[in-house]
Amino acid sequence: HGKEPRQPKLGILLIDHGSKRQASNDNLHSIAASYQSTWDEIITANNNFDGNNTAVIVRAAHMEIASPSILTTLRQLVLEDEITQAVCVPYFLSPGKHATVDVPQLINEARDALEKEGLLDYNDGRVEILSSKVLGSNIESMLKVVDGLVRNTLEEEGGGLDILQLPRSPDDDLVNGSGSSITSNEINDSINQEE
């Protein structure tokens, strides 16, 4: 099983904490489905889509409390989706213990389990399982998201500030941090010092 040659295929696994609240768990799966649609559009636009063999598969898993687990979903990606490489993305805003210790440990344990089950080797290669940094570690992108939330709130609910006076460009001082008293590099440095 799984020893036949494989076409290159990337598995992307979004991993959150997991919740007793089903709507919270469903949210991550909706995000994964949206990200999958984005990849499908890119692949189709580049004429690399044959209808049966999507080059990217996006899934979601939970660290604890809810299913599917990291191991279950990685097993599905390797066995059923026949990926050749996986990137696990800890879907956490802050680089706390769950994101920097618990999730990487669970990914390593899942990799070890799949290795023991003989699922990582296939005819012409070996499935590689990688991990990205925590979602919230991309400070520039997070600042853009915060800026968007502030602007939307001011537009929808009003307030004393004229939003037209706020800088608009994504490269402006507000977003890239160069006009503030603390820069994104300083934020990243403080995060790295805490680890």
Image (cartoon, rainbow, N blue to C red):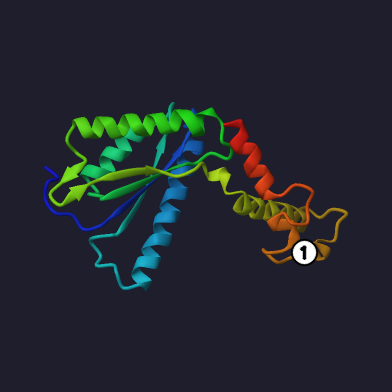
The answer to whether residue 25 is above or below residue 145 is above
Residue 21 visible to an observer of this rendering: no
> Is 19 on the left-hand or right-hand side of 51?
right
Q: Is residue 138 left or right of residue 47?
A: right
- Reading the image, the residue beneath label 1 is 167
Q: Residue at 71%, 49% (x, y): give it.
A: 183
Residue 106 coordinates in the image, percent (x, y): 38, 30
In the rendered view, tell whether residue 30 sits above or below residue 163: above
* Front-lying residue, 162 or 89: 89
Q: Amino acid at mark 1?
A: Pro
**Residue 128 image offset from top left, x and y in percent:** 29, 45
Q: Is residue 52 left or right of residue 98?
A: left
- Count numbered badges in the picture: 1
Establish if 146 lies above or below 62.
Answer: below
Q: Is residue 26 visible?
A: yes
Residue sitting at x 77%, y 64%: 167
Residue drawn at 39 percent across, 55 percent down: 36
On the rendered image, what quadrant is the C terminus found in?
top right
**Residue at image x 21%, y 58%?**
7
Q: Nearer the viewer, residue 67 or 109?
A: 109
Viewport quadrant of the N terminus: top left
Query: Which quarter of the figure has residue 166?
Result: bottom right
Judge whether 109 appears above or below 187 on screen.
above
